[in-house]
Image (cartoon, coloured by chain):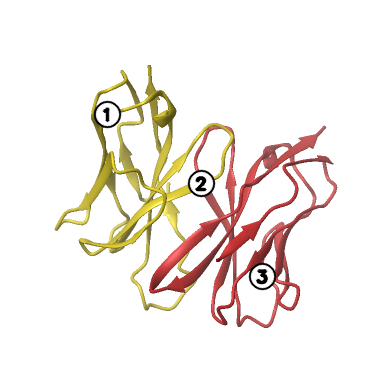
Chain colours: A yellow, B red
Amino acid sequence: DSGVTQTPKHLITATGQRVTLRCSPRSGDLSVYWYQQSLDQGLQFLIQYYNGEERAKGNILERFSAQQFPDLHSELNLSSLELGDSALYFCASSPNLGTSGTREQFFGPGTRLTVL
Amino acid sequence: AQKITQTQPGMFVQEKEAVTLDCTYDTSDQSYGLFWYKQPSSGEMIFLIYQGSYDEQNATEGRYSLNFQKARKSANLVISASQLGDSAMYFCAYLVREGTYKYIFGTGTRLKVLA
């Protein structure tokens, strides 16, 4: 157990709909990252937050948005869903920027989104 | 642009044999970190091993070791005494600082361990 939680575990919805994925980082981690993994693909970095502020953006569509709340949990909002948005969405957290150590990312179990 | 390459989309290894998964990276940064993750069929991402760019010795964690060749910009993962449970997707990643810390992942290598 990495200490990162994601809900829901599975989500099935229809095209055109909007969904929200939730992530709680490990206790004490200020950084949260979102990734998309389509079938048999690598991880595509979407967006990073640090202590409530957006820090980096990757290949995130305009239909997608995210935020990190004062309690450090994060939500990824996906709207106007398309079939191609079906994927495994991972949240990861890492120790504070500037601290020493390996700084590996700890991944949540993922949310599998299926758009029908 | 920062880039990380895993040239082996799939590999087979006999149980109890050693296997090397390749990873090369392209960065102009002097300070960075290299990671390997395992993703079994159940989908979770499991951290395996880390190598810092300034580390003198190759990292080892149990049956996992990292063959770090800085001049060649390669960070190959060596799994010794393969087990059936090692069958999974393996991702190489590195951490660089581009304004903020950024993790970049390779496309992965699917390893199948044969009985």
- Where does residue A115 sit, x and y in percent of width and height? 37, 22
Spatial CA distance of label 3 from label 1 is 45 Å
Q: State the image quarter where residue A27 is shown.
A: bottom left
Q: What residue would you read off at disc 3?
A: B59
Where does the C terminus of chain A fall, quadrant-wise?
Answer: top left
- Relative to A56, say whether A112 is above or below: above
Disc 2 marks which amino acid?
A: Leu
Left or right position of B86 against A107: right
Separation of disc 1 and disc 2 at Cα?
A: 22 Å
In the picture, measured across the screen, residue B84 lies left or right of residue A72, that is right
> Which residue: 51% across, 67% down?
B95
Pointer 1: what residue? A80
Q: Residue furthest left?
A: A70
Badges 2 and 3, same chain: no
Label 1 in the same subunit as label 2 = yes
- Secondary element type, mark 2: loop
Of the numbered discs 1 and 2, the one sitting upstream in the chain is 2
Q: Position of residue B10 (x, y in %)?
A: 75, 40
Which is more toward the observer, A107 or A113? Answer: A113
Marks 2/3: CA–CA distance: 24 Å
Camera-near label (2 vs 3) is: 2
> What residue sits 61% from the left and 47% below the top?
B107
